[in-house]
Image (spheres, grey):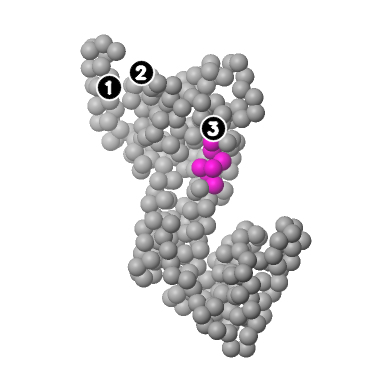
Amino acid sequence: MTAVTEHHASETRASIETRAGIETEALRFCILGPLSMTVHGREAAPTAAKQRQVLCLLLMNVGRRVTTTALTSELWPNEVPRTAKTALQTYISALRRLFAKELGLPAETVAASLLTTDAGSYTLHLPASCWDGAEFQALLEQGEGAAARGDYEEAETTLARALSMCQGDILEDVVKGPQLRPLARFLDEARLHGEEILVDTFLRTGKKNQAVCRATTLADRNPYHEGLHAQLMRSLYAAGRRNDALKAYRELDARLADELGTVPSPETRTLHHALLQDAPDAAFLRLAPVSVG
């Protein structure tokens, strides 16, 4: 790169950073459900399946390099065609044109400062505020931290706000290959962890009916998740519904045996044993301390 080109690139970056403070305020990506990309509230997400995959992989690694190898394995997990390199460049070019059009930027500015190429990789440069995944994770961390220090009112408010952002399965309308799947799964596990802590918060503050409602929905949606079913059992017992709590265990036990050929964990069986007693040992019903992580 010549000194002139380096100077131009520096000016371009400064230019987009200045403009980004204005332009990117109107740009919003949502991945906590169907993929959405809006500019000034107008939907602008690409419709081609592989372009959407490329965009999502770049977005979920925003600010970090994504190698062409990673992108290629995401798009063609079974057999990479001979035209893969050209096709990938076509998808990147299409995304750059889309950004240029929607943000009112010159194409060369987008290529130099927004969606860049460097040493066999691509990087999407956007502030974290542009996508819901970053806000979601930050709110979960704040809520879990509040619960860990015993500030359950703040924990409930913050976790409820984070979880209300979820509008369905992560990237539910995007094809997910070997690169996107674990990233989506990570966010889904973070969501479930936040849900568990929110139910804990309800129980710790005596909101038994809210705990039952939330835990019931979670257990129904996650039929093999023992932690959520244990929470449901505790919630039902706390609400004075011991028979329903025992029924929840029986249903879980039968489902695990019939469909997975397994049995509940020792912890879940111990909880069940405690619920069978006329005067259960409170130690087995007590919630574990909230932990972050």
Q: Quadrant of the C terminus?
A: bottom left
Q: Which class describes the residues within 10 Å of circle 3: few (<14), some (14-19), or many (20+)?
A: many
Quick check: is 87 in the magenta stretch? no
Residue type at numbered disc 1 = Thr
Tell me the amino acid under the disc marked 2.
Glu
Q: Inspect the image, locate mark 3, and give the three-letter code of the amino acid beneath it.
A: Gln
- Residue 108 is labelled as 2
Vertical side of 6 occupied by 137: above or below: below
Give the magenta part as a residue range. 179-185
Residue that mark 3 sits on: 53
Residue at 26% across, 11% down: 2
Do the residues bearing badges 2 and 3 touch, measured as CB atoms within 8 Å?
no
Question: How would you classify the magenta stretch by its main secondary structure?
Answer: helix
Is 13 positioned to the left or the right of 249 in the image? left
The residue shown at (54%, 36%) is: 179
Residue at numbered disc 1: 12
Residue 291 screen position, x and y as percent? 42, 63
**Which of 200 and 50 lies nearest the eye of the viewer?**
200
